Image (cartoon, grey):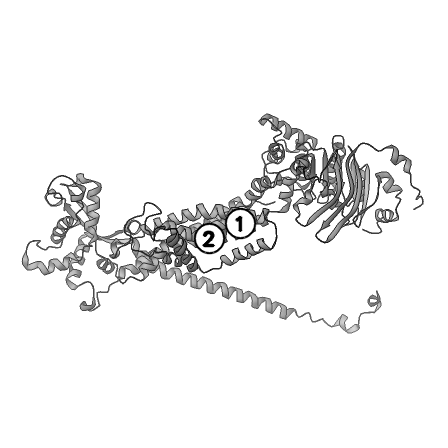
């Protein structure tokens, strides 16, 4: 009361007070600038990453192929005429059909002994996987024998790189994988339209191969899908059950505190440690097969569990207590309250956490190296017990390969992995939007 | 102030059957004691209001009556509360059954984020009160009618309960509580989040419900207590200072503290 009675000093009434406004606004502007710089840097690096991967990788979605008219001569393929798959499976016989057809296409005589050296050079233009592709085609449909088919066969990886301009004509011939003579043939084939770039479906269907043109992510995608399935089936119910118990039923005491701390710590354990654990427990102790996606799935389940538990617990915590009270108030039991009201309201959060955990698991490489999933697997796995690789492991393996054509395949595989991750994250956001309720 | 002499005669003669009888009720939250031996008899088919300043223990006491305090880990309740002839803190008493007999309406309207129909049907369904669909529809309609909400929502029973206005939501919560046919309805400041018009409607409803249910209401509004209740208990610092017919509490309180509180000197 006393200070009110004191008349305001004359000076303060007339002179403008210094509120320090200029300084305050300046610091605000400065802070905004820092923020924009940070975001700008982030976007810049993201753009650089994408530009680099896309420019390197988009070419891998096309593959150079050669169109040949092949007569599937029964005398060569099946001299006995029994159509026995064992006989038909001999890949070397298919070479005897492809090679002469190709020599004719580039104007070489298949029989002339003087041209033997040229033929040897010309042969390298065709992929050695071409015969196997043709064989698989015939095995699928033995009726083709005796007919003449126009087939696009694979060109070799080096030819592919050359056609895509990744091997320069200017390089000295001695240091160039593609020789001058081959270049002349290739140019002629390209001019005639017999050689062309086609969509590379093999990238998605082939397994591992030392020849880039027959290497694909087929095995890796199937392996990753198996593992994601296992993680989803195991980690989601176990994680949700554990969180519900911890959050809703468990008494709050030293033991549950200890468990909580440990779960949080587990989320921060380096993934390679989980790989070692998987090696020791699932392979050495339980005797599960090496390189199998079931072991990978189990290891990734262990890794994903803490993420799901933490996400689920915070989703359960976020359900307003008024909803629990409402349910308890009409006489619902604790279990009914949780399963009829709390869990449905928490489900968007649980789903988001699960998808993010799955995305993490999908991109995980280190633990899979420990359990032998870094393997040369040619055959598409049909069950989780078969040897398989995973997408990130495939990228890791291709990144270490020497051939020029593996560079673009590495980038293409990264693009495909990123596409999967983006799809998962977007679906997490959409699910959240779709099911989010307000109260 | 002018007349402090108690009128015991009116009180003694008009006592009705006792629905809930609390004896020496004590509540501890961990080391902190919230109620210090509360004795209160709640009459059947009457509205009993619990008034008092914030933190005096009236909500705590209310939540003892259907064991809602069980959900708080550190809360422990002593003494005895009898509903009819059972002691509700008897270990043999099933809390789910108790809460079906003693319903509750909360401070903030808290409908389930489901349809209006589902909000009301939920209680009868989990208690198995309805044999078939038409039975259920009957219960839902009659509950909404009793809560005076039916005419406002009859065309949109499938719409979410959370889409109603605050006052309608609170009446929906009341309808949800009466759908399981409780004997007692506890209301914890049911109008504190509502505007005056919605409040008037809820108060009117409380007065109508008195015919079939015993109602205990916690309120911060003295006018509300005076308007809706027949008996009033004044809580202060974890004790009941005074309890009696509402009219007497508001016109001739026996205790100086009650007098001070209802005239607005503290609280």
Q: Residue at x 46, y 50 (%)?
A: A426
Viewer can see residue B224: no
- Are there few (<14), some (14-19), or many (20+) residues within 10 Å of tag 2? many
Q: Is B249 left or right of A177, judged from the image as shown? A: right
Q: Position of residue A304 (x, y in %)?
A: 46, 53
Q: Residue at x 39, y 57 (%)?
A: A365
Whether residue B58 can be seen here: yes
Q: Chain of mark 2?
A: A
**Judging from the image, what secondary structure is the residue with disc 2 in?**
helix
Residue A97 placement, left or right of B39: left
A56 sits left or right of B185 in the view: left
Decide: is B146 above or below A281: above
Of B154 and A75, nearer the camera is A75
Q: Quadrant of residue A47?
A: bottom left
Q: Residue at x 12, y 50 (%)?
A: A96
Work out how far the residue at label 1 is from the one at label 2, CA to CA, in angstroms.
12 Å
Q: Quadrant of the N terminus of chain A?
A: bottom right
Sequence-wise, which precedes: disc 1 or disc 2? 2
| Coordinates of residue A331 in the picture (x, y in percent) | 64, 37
Look at the numbered disc 1 and give the secondary structure of its residue.
Answer: helix
- List the residue tagged with mark 2: A304
- Residue neighbourhood size for the residue with mark 1, other residues' Cα within 10 Å, grouped as few (<14), some (14–19), many (≥20): many
Residue situated in front as seen by the camera: A26 or B77: B77
Q: Quadrant of residue A324?
A: top right
The residue pinned by badge 1 equals: A312
In this picture, residue B209 sits left or right of residue A293: right
Q: Residue furthest bottom?
A: A11
Q: Residue furthest left?
A: A113
């Amino acid at each position: 009361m006393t200070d009110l009675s004191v008349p305001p000093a004359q000076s303060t009434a007339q002179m403008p007070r210094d509120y320090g406004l200029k300084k305050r606004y300046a610091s605000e502007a400065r802070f905004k600038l820092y923020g924009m710089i940070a975001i700008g840097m982030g976007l810049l690096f993201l753009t650089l990453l994408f530009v680099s991967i896309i420019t390197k990788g988009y070419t891998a979605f096309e593959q150079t192929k050669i169109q040949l008219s092949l007569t599937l001569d029964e005398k060569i393929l099946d001299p006995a005429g029994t159509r026995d798959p064992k006989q038909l499976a001999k890949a070397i016989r298919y070479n005897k059909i492809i090679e002469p057809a190709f020599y004719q296409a580039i104007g070489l005589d298949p029989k002339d002994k003087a041209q033997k050296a040229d033929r040897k050079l010309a042969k390298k233009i065709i992929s050695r996987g071409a015969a196997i592709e043709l064989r698989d085609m015939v095995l699928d449909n033995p009726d083709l024998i005796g007919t003449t088919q126009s087939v696009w066969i694979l060109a070799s990886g080096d030819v592919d790189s050359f056609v895509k301009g990744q091997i320069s004509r200017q390089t000295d011939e001695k240091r160039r994988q593609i020789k001058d003579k081959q270049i002349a043939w290739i140019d002629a084939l390209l001019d005639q339209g017999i050689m062309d770039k086609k969509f590379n479906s093999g990238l998605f269907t082939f397994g591992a191969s030392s020849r880039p043109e027959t290497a694909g992510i087929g095995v890796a995608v199937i392996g990753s899908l198996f593992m994601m399935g296992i993680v989803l089936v195991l980690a989601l119910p176990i994680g949700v059950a554990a969180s519900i118990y911890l959050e809703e039923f468990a008494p709050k005491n030293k033991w549950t505190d200890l468990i909580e701390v440990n779960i949080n710590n587990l989320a921060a354990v380096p993934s390679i440690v989980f790989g070692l654990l998987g090696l020791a427990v699932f392979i050495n102790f339980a005797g599960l097969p090496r390189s199998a996606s079931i072991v990978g799935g189990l290891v990734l389940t262990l890794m994903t569990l803490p993420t799901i538990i933490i996400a689920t617990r915070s989703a359960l915590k976020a359900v307003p207590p008024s909803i629990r009270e409402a349910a308890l108030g009409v006489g619902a039991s604790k279990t009914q309250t949780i399963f009829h009201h709390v869990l449905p309201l928490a489900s968007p959060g649980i789903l988001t956490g699960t998808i993010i955990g799955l995305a993490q698991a999908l991109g995980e490489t280190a633990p899979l190296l420990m359990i032998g999933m870094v393997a040369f697997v040619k055959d598409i796995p049909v069950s989780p017990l078969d040897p398989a690789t995973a997408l990130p492991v495939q990228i890791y393996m291709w990144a270490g390969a020497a051939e020029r054509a593996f560079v673009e395949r590495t980038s293409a595989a990264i693009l495909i992995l990123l596409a999967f991750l983006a799809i998962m994250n977007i679906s997490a956001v959409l699910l959240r939007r779709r099911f989010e309720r307000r109260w | 102030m002018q007349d402090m002499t108690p009128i015991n005669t009116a009180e003694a003669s008009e006592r009705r059957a006792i629905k809930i009888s609390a004896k020496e009720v004590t509540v501890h939250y961990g080391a902190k004691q919230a109620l210090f031996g509360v004795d209160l008899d709640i009459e059947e088919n009457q509205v009993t209001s619990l008034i008092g300043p914030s933190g005096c223990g009236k909500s705590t006491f209310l939540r003892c009556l259907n064991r809602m305090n069980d959900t708080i880990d550190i809360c422990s309740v002593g003494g005895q509360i009898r509903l009819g002839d059972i002691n509700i803190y008897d270990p043999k008493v099933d809390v789910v059954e108790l809460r079906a007999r003693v319903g509750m309406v909360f401070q903030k309207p808290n409908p389930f984020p489901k349809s209006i129909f589902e909000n009301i049907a939920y209680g009868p369904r989990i208690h198995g009160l309805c044999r078939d669909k038409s039975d259920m529809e009957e219960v839902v309609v009659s509950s909404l009618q009793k809560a005076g909400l039916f005419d406002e929502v009859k065309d949109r029973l499938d719409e979410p309960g959370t889409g109603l206005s605050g006052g309608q939501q609170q009446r929906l919560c009341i309808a949800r509580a009466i759908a399981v046919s409780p004997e007692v309805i506890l209301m914890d400041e049911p109008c504190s989040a509502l505007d005056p018009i919605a409040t008037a409607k809820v108060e009117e409803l409380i007065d109508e419900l008195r015919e079939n249910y015993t109602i205990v209401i916690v309120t911060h509004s003295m006018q509300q207590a005076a308007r809706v209740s027949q008996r009033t208990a004044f809580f202060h610092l974890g004790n009941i200072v005074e309890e009696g017919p509402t009219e007497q509490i508001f016109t001739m309180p026996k205790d100086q503290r009650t007098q001070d509180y209802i005239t607005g000197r503290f609280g």
